[in-house]
Amino acid sequence: MKCLKALIADVPYSNKKLASMDMEERYRLIMSTIFNAIGCRVEVEKMIATGRIDMVVETTNFVYVLELKLSNNGGIDAATEQIRAKQYIEPFKADKRKVVALAIELDDKGKGLVDWKEV
């Protein structure tokens, strides 16, 4: 998470394509690009029976279920509640890999990753 925070902080705010996106979409694009670049399998806005997971990142040994929330949209508490209420890890329980759900709070002004916690 420390490296991810540093990479997000390094993206210039003046990029015109990024500036035209809403802030959460911008973060999803940046994060999915980073995870793809390091060799992870990434699915953005994965639809399941109870809703849409912001991002699922898969490695050889782990499945990460990520829910992103902007600070002005409830932040880490809202992300945590959504993961629990919509049972986002349920579809992965039969997977032999370790499943890790992460609630991630992002700055609504584009300043980067604010906080995160395992749910």
Image: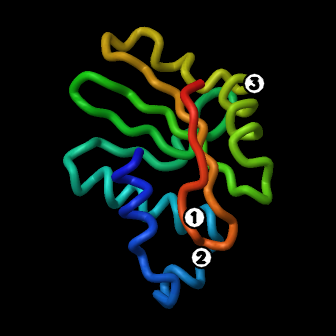
Residue at left offset 69%, top offset 66%:
108
Which residue is disc 1 drawn over? 25
* Residue 42 in the image: above or below residue 111: above
Q: Which of the 4 image quadrants contains residue 117?
A: top right
Specify which label sits upstream in the sequence, 1 or 3. Answer: 1
Q: How many numbered marks, from 0 up? A: 3
Q: Which residue is mark 2?
A: 21
What type is the residue that disc 1 sits on? Answer: Glu
Q: Amino acid at mark 2?
A: Met
Near mark 1 (Cα within 10 A), the count class, few <14, some 14-19 or many ≥20, is some
- Image quarter hosting the C terminus: top right
- Residue 88 in percent (x, y) is at 60, 26
Q: Residue at x 39, y 61 (%)?
A: 6
In the picture, measured across the screen, residue 110 lies left or right of residue 55, that is right
Q: CA distance from mark 1 to mark 2?
A: 6 Å
Q: Label 2 crowding class (10 Å Cα cut-off): few <14, some 14-19, many 20+? A: few
Quarter assignment of residue 73: bottom right
> What amino acid is found at the position of numbered circle 3 in the picture?
Ala
Circles 1, 2 touching at the beta carbon (< 8 Å): yes
In screen coordinates, is 50 left or right of 20? right
**Residue at 65% across / 62% down in the picture?**
107
* Residue marked by disc 3: 85
Mark positioned earlier in the residue sequence (3 or 2): 2
Nearest the camera: 13 or 47? 13
Residue shown at 50%/58% (left/top)? 28
Relative to 43, say whether 73 is above or below: below
Image quadrant where one finds the N terminus = top left
Expressed as whole percent of the image width and height from the top left, the position of residue 72 reads 79, 59
